[in-house]
Amino acid sequence: MSKNIILLGAPGAGKGTQAIKIAERYKIPHISTGDIFRKNIREGTPIGLKAKGYIDGGKLVPDEVTIALVDSRLKESDCAKGWLLDGFPRTTAQAEALDKIAKVTTVVNVDVDLNKLSDRITSRRVCPDCGGSYSTVTYSNSNCTCGSKLVQRDDDKEETVKSRLQVYANSTAPLIEYYKKKGVLVSVDGNKAIDEVAKEIAKVLG
Ligand code: AMP
């Protein structure tokens, strides 16, 4: 059976880092709506132009834009044997739309202490080339291991983080209950070290 996995969790929970490992392990595409939006913004596409204001303000891009984007991505041939969604769905409307597109097999909720998130996000530095993600707390080098210069995402700055965490609490956290009711939710403790969280995820995904 194909693995259609969703990674759920607050901004800064470590979804992106874990997503890379899961996608490698099961050889399924890692689909991050945030990454797709940022690529569109860099390339100045119509979707990028629509999304930029929302992302810069720490708000969600409207459902109709995001759902259409994911719908067409999941129709690509590399998704035939499964996929891993990172950052989608983020609203009940998105989850309901996804239910009409495909059958979700497992939702992994990366559970973290909400009080730690703001610090985690503002200390995050990312590689614009390979997508690597680091914390200034544990990684003092200004370059990625691939050699490119690390940057701070504009929406990881303190003023935007507050709004993103509020949006998570209001719009995305209810999805935990949504998927629990469907019997597909598993929660892992995202406060642990990266490798320990990865092990826990591997255990629940089998
Ligand atoms: P992320 O990289 O997942 O933290 O996403 C960065 C930003 O992209 C979010 O703060 C939103 O503005 C936008 N975004 C990503 N995924 C979604 C989604 N599923 N629905 C609406 N907006 C999204």
Image: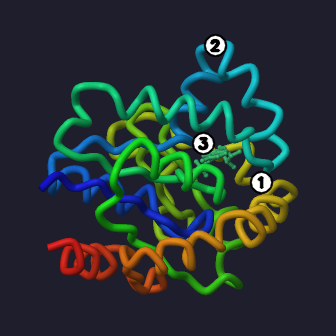
Q: In which quarter of the image is the N terminus?
A: bottom left
**Label 3 CB sits under 8 Å from any ligand 1 atom:** no
Q: Residue 6 vs residue 47: left or right?
A: left
Q: Which mark is residue 151?
A: 3
Residue shown at the point (20%, 36%) measured from the top left: 80
**What is the number of callouts on the image?**
3
Q: Which amino acid does label 1 sit on?
A: Lys
Q: Which mark is residue 17?
A: none
Q: Residue 85 vs residue 159: left or right?
A: left
Q: Residue 121 vs residue 141: left or right?
A: right
Which residue is denoted by mark 2 in the rendering?
A: 45
In what element is the residue under mark 3? loop
Label 1, label 2: how many angstroms apart (C-alpha)? 24 Å
Q: Which comes sooner in the sequence, label 1 or label 2?
A: 2
Label 2, label 3: how many angstroms apart (C-alpha)? 22 Å
Say if 28 sits above or below 71 in the image.
Answer: below
Q: Position of residue 104 (x, y in %)?
A: 35, 58
- Camera-nearest label, 1 or 2: 2
**Label 2 CB sits under 8 Å from any ligand 1 atom:** no
Residue shown at the point (51%, 81%) measured from the top left: 111
Q: Position of residue 117 (x, y in %)?
A: 66, 74
